[in-house]
Image (cartoon, rainbow, N blue to C red):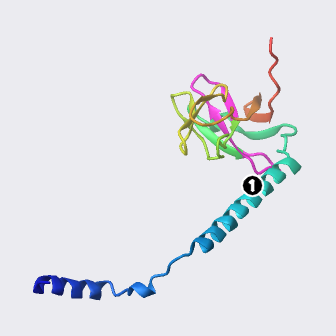
Amino acid sequence: MSKKEDNLNKNWKKDFPIEKQQATNVSRRDFAKFLTLVSGGLMVGSGLVAAKAYMYPKEEVQGEHFVCKKEEVPVGGTRAFVIEGSTIPYILIHLETGEFKAYEQKCTHLSCSVFYKPGTGIIHCPCHEGSFDAKTGNVLAGPPPRALPKLDVFFKDDAIYVKAAQEEKMG
């Protein structure tokens, strides 16, 4: 071994003073125990989420709810709101056509928050590039499995109200 190589070895050992015996090795058995524990935890967690969804179905919107005045949402603008007694976030959109639409503000894929892209007619989910039609709430692109839940929008003078969406009749 040359003097230069010997010097490099000494410097390396100063910079990284870990002895081989100090390194911890995980046995196959310990690793298998760890994987079993993690898998079991994930299974129990998934079961609890499914049980909660089954035992406590999604709350239905009851009655009529005031959102804001018409002049508070400009054309192409939006307003986030939550109905009294609920925790579900909604978004009111004033489309460029003059129509007002209201949708749940959670993507139907993984519940990320969606937003309206003014001038495009698209409600976008930035998490996994999902897109919804702002007029209907239907999926246009990406992974969302179903349309955004919507509310019916109606007016009393210049006040905007929402209520549970009426099922559209197939003709």
Left or right: residue 27 versus residue 64 is left
Q: Position of residue 63 (x, y in %)?
A: 87, 38
User: How many labels sit on residues?
Assistant: 1
* Residue type for callout 1: Ser
Please identify the quadrant where the C terminus is shown.
top right
Which one is in front, 13 or 32?
A: 32
Residue 27 placement: quadrant: bottom right
Please give the name of the residue rendered at 66% of the width and 30% of the height, measured from the top-left corner: 137
Q: Position of residue 31 (x, y in %)?
A: 59, 70
Please identify the quadrant where the N terminus is shown.
bottom left
Q: Which residues are magenta?
A: 82-102
Which one is in front, 161 or 57?
A: 57
Q: Position of residue 152 (x, y in %)?
A: 77, 30
Q: Is residue 80 magenta?
A: no
Query: SS at mark 1?
Result: helix
Please give the name of the residue rendered at 61% of the width and 74% of the height, measured from the top-left corner: 30
Q: Is residue 90 magenta?
A: yes
Residue annotated with mark 1: 46
